[in-house]
Image (cartoon, grey):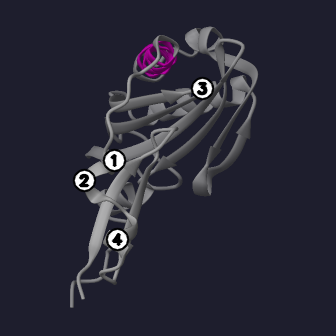
Amino acid sequence: MKIVSFISFHAYGVALICAAGFASCAQHIPLQNSMKTTQIAPDDKQRSQFVRDFVENVFNAHDPSAGPTYLQPDFKVINGFLGVRSGRDAYLTAITRMAQTFPDLHATVEDAFASGDRVAIRLTIEGTQRAPLWGIPATNKKLRWTGNNIYRLENGKIAEEWASEDWLALFIQLDQFHPPAPQ
């Protein structure tokens, strides 16, 4: 029996991974066609750039005053174990706190995809922890983690964000979690 796996990028830039433990999977899924190149509509390029600009001008610049340019007043972010945060001001306050904890906080947008009113980005986030974070004392360690976020735009601004960050990598670097040794 052979394992067949592939990655297929769909409308919102979300990678779906298929792995099947049976050879017949290849009969149903043409692997050579799983990565198709498509033209990006000019509007999709503009929406992708808008989200890149948001990351640069608000998150990386640590500038909450730029937030209203990019975020709807009733902006909502859904972020895994951190829960749902509603309202642009609440989000910008959280960004300010993160920048106080990580004064050199910076996100690099590795990829951005847009389709319709959605933009998906893949990020690498870095910063040196200079203040307590979720009860963890400052470590002065340079930390690095990744994230995948999907944004929904409405009337030319970001209305919602679904954030999925690799908090486990962050906790391991903060010496708060020790994965089991390989067997």
Q: Looking at the picture, does residue 167 appear above or below residue 160?
A: below
Which residue is labeled 1 in the image?
A: 145
Which residue is labeled 3 in the image?
A: 116
The residue located at (54%, 32%) in the rendering is 97
Which residue is labeled 4 in the image?
A: 27
Q: Earlier in the sequence, mark 2 or mark 1?
A: 2
Q: Amino acid at mark 4?
A: Gln
Q: Earlier in the sequence, mark 1 or mark 4?
A: 4
In this image, 63 relative to 173: left or right? right
Q: CA distance from mark 2 to mark 1?
A: 32 Å
Quarter holding the N terminus? bottom left
Q: CA distance from mark 1 to mark 4?
A: 37 Å
Q: From the viewer's perspective, is the residue at label 3 or at label 4 nearer?
A: 4
Using the rendered image of the protein, determine whether residue 177 is visible from the camera's viewpoint.
no
Disc 3 to disc 2: CB gap under 8 Å: no
Using the rendered image of the protein, determine whether residue 94 is visible from the camera's viewpoint.
yes
The residue located at (32%, 27%) in the rendering is 104
Q: From the viewer's perspective, is the residue at label 2 or at label 1 nearer?
A: 2
Q: Earlier in the sequence, mark 1 or mark 3?
A: 3
Q: CA distance from mark 1 to mark 3?
A: 28 Å
Question: What is the magenta range?
Answer: 44-58
Disc 2 to disc 1: CB gap under 8 Å: no
Q: Amino acid at mark 3?
A: Gly
Task: Tell whether position 28 is magenta.
Answer: no
* Element on which disc 2 rests: helix
Location of residue 120 in the rendering, given as x and y in whole percent from the top left corner: 48, 35
Q: Looking at the picture, does residue 83 appear above or below residue 51?
A: below
